[in-house]
């Protein structure tokens, strides 16, 4: 995969106070934490920097430290995040963010606003028939030659089994596969590359996929 900047994390106690229900603790665990961090780092490595970035589904703002070093303005869109709490958390840290609550399928931004739209573990939650709508909306808010960068899990029987062991049907959380996402991105954007992140378990194969596309 080559060298890339590591994910900059605040102490767990600080992030946990930002949103106690967020599963941020996984990023600090041994072994599994490395995998969680690597998938985010690989997405960030595809971001080219510029004037404005929009992260869709930012949650507690896990990437904002890194993004603030790459872009002049950091914007975030999330359906449920407490934008005041998250914004104040980062403002105290010296990072100004511009956050909104809203839907990826109808984003509250003018056309051609962003250099990069970033989505980490978001697009798999859309239904397959919504993917093309999302891609066209991302295209609308990107500047010409702007980039779409996304990360989505690669479905494996082991993943479905682990979810079942936790009492969760993966189909109730993930409505689209990585193939659905890349196929619809190809319909709207110019593909730069799609990267498979391998599992740390030998023989398991890819567990996460990172897509890098440009608005033509």
Image (tube, rainbow, N blue to C red):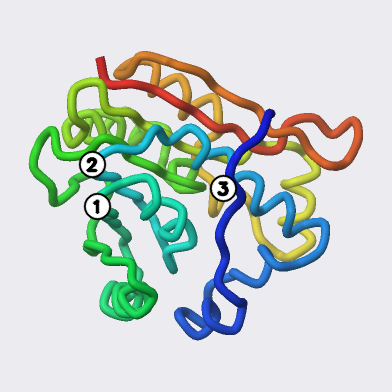
Residue assigned mark 1: 73
Camera-near label (3 vs 2) is: 2
Q: Quadrant of the N terminus?
A: top right
Q: Residue at x 29, y 57 (%)?
A: 76
Q: Is residue 75 above or below residue 148?
A: below
Q: Nearer the viewer, residue 92 or 63?
A: 92
Question: In the image, 27: left or right of 9?
Answer: right
**Occupied quadrant, residue 3:** top right
Earlier in the chain: of badge 2 and badge 1, it is: 2
Tell me the CA gap for discs 2 and 1: 6 Å
How far across and down, in percent of the image, does residue 25 sit?
A: 66, 72
The count of marks equals: 3
Report the disc number at residue 35: none
Q: Nearer the viewer, residue 63 or 204?
A: 63
Q: Is residue 50 above or below residue 132?
A: below
- Which residue is denoted by mark 2 in the rendering? 51
Secondary element type, mark 1: strand
Name the disc covering residue 40, or none.
3
């Amino acid at each position: 995969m080559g060298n890339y900047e590591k994910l900059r994390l605040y102490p767990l106690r600080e992030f946990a106070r930002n949103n106690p229900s967020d599963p941020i603790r996984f990023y600090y665990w041994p072994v599994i934490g490395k995998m969680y961090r690597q998938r985010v780092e690989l997405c960030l490595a595809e971001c080219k920097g510029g004037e404005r970035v929009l992260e869709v589904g930012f949650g507690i703002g896990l990437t904002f430290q890194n993004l603030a070093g790459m872009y002049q303005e950091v914007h975030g869109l999330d359906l449920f995040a407490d934008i005041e709490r998250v914004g104040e958390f980062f403002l105290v840290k010296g990072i100004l963010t511009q956050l909104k609550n809203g839907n990826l399928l109808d984003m509250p931004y003018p056309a051609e606003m962003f250099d990069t739209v970033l989505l980490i573990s978001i697009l798999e939650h859309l239904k397959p028939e919504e993917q093309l709508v999302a891609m066209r909306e991302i295209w609308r808010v990107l500047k010409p030659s702007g980039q779409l960068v996304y990360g989505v899990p690669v479905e494996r029987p082991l993943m479905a089994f682990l979810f079942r062991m936790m009492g969760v049907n993966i189909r109730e959380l993930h409505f689209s596969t990585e193939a659905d996402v890349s196929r619809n991105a190809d319909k709207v954007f110019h593909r730069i590359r799609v990267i498979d992140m391998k599992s740390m378990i030998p023989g398991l194969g890819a567990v996460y996929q990172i897509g890098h596309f440009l608005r033509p």
